[in-house]
Amino acid sequence: MSNEKKALLLIGSPKGENSTSASIGNYLISKLKEFGMTSEIGFVHRLVNREEKRQDLFRMIDSADLIILSFPLYVDSLPAPVIKAMELINEEKDKLKSKKSKNFIAIANSGFPEASQSTVALQICRVFSKDCGFVWKGGLALGGGAAIHGTPLQERGGMVRNVIKGLNISANALRDNKDIPQEAIDLFSKKFIPSSLYKMFGNFGWKLQARRYGVKKNLKDKPYSV
Amino acid sequence: MMKALILDGRLKNDFDMIQSLIIEELERNEFEVESILLREAKVAACQGCFDCWIKTPGKCKTDDYGREVAKKMVQSNLVIHFTPITFGGYSSELKKVLDRFIPTILPFFTKRNGETHHRYRYEKRGSIIALGVLEKPNEEKESIFKELVYRNSLNMGAPVHESIIYTKKLSKNDFISEFANLLKKVEG
């Protein structure tokens, strides 16, 4: 890619700037900027409900050479507002003013330690990319996203070293207009905590938080029992 | 009487005939049927805050129709995901209520089929039949859709899960006979 190219980061988390989706996407954007790319960031949940915001979304898509969708896994798929955005973009694809080719990648992060749980969500992204006439450059999946907790990757230390390596390799590939290599996909998806530890810390964490809000004894309540 | 809940995630008024056929077939099998046209339902997007686990266990903090749908899902024997197959997945209208299903499971992790999942909050859980509609057959989209339904069944704890794809190439009789066979599995 030449230095004139523009990357659009679409953040598909309701937590916006404070999300793990943003931590990951922002790091990748920072690498692409080092290569001379310009960038724009859109927060999907704020772009789909009102008509004037939807026009902003279409303008962002229209002006991008590379679209990066970074999202959390919600019930085995993408969050509803992100699917809404995809439906809208697909409906409007023929009205895009710019006829330039657009590369598309997707990055999923989930609260489960196994990155493979995001496979279906990335397949949905690949089909979306094809239906819209974008060029699919690949998908990355991260498990155990709660351990990043929306903080900048550079501040998470050695725990995320493989995540960073995977993003660095991906950035190099995207600069050269290549697909994300398997090496990057594998590094990015490597568990940074064993599943058993993640489960133990996770379960402990939920109880701790519930105690803070005075509902530890109610954690297993069944308000909808017949 | 068994309860069936149709979560109608269609984005426009198409495939009405399919909806009528499944309601007829369910009633013929003595299900009490409720169908919700989700595009007319005001349901806010899940905020991913997990308050439904750690502040108000079992209930979403957002007091809108999303709560009611979650309750109906828990209290149904069969939940039908009726949706246009959208890039291989569900429509945004169906997904907005499925995202709000989270309060009905527990935060705690467990292992299921070798993977980490959340424990179930309720002992009794509904089966799922996903009815995806497509203008024309598409192997890739159909395969992704079926895998998504399978993964949902793991997370939601559906005792029976089945997918049925309707395209305009499928005859009305073939469709309804396929649907009737799936219902038999649910009735077990």
Image (tube, coloured by chain):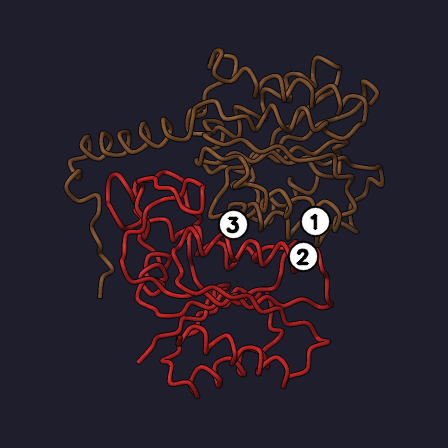
Which residue in the structure is indicated by mark 2?
Answer: B141
Residue B70 screen position, x and y as percent: 35, 59
Q: Colour of chain A?
A: brown
Q: CA distance from mark 2 to mark 1?
A: 8 Å
Q: Is residue A208 left or right of residue B62?
A: left
Amino acid on which disc 2 is placed:
Lys
- For disc 3, the chain is A
Name the chain under label 2. B
State the mark number for residue A127: 1
Q: Which residue is mark 3?
A: A80
Q: Please report contact status of discs 2 and 1: CB closer than 8 Å, yes or no.
A: yes
Q: CA separation, marks 3 and 2?
A: 18 Å
Mark 1 or mark 3, whichever is nearer to me? 1
Q: Is residue B179 left or right of residue A127?
A: left
Q: Determine whether the residue tagged by mark 3 lies in a helix, strand or loop.
A: helix
Instruction: Say whether mark 2 and mark 3 are on the same chain.
Output: no
- What shade has chain B been given? red
The residue closer to the viewer here, B101 or A64, is: B101
Numbered label attached to residue B5: none
Quick one: label 2, few (<14), some, or many (20+) residues within 10 Å?
some
Residue drawn 63% across the image and 21% down it: A166
Q: Secondary structure at mark 1?
A: helix
Amino acid of disc 1: Val
10 Å crowding of disc 1: few (<14), some (14-19), many (20+): many
**Which numbered mark, 3 or 2, is in the foreground of this view?**
2
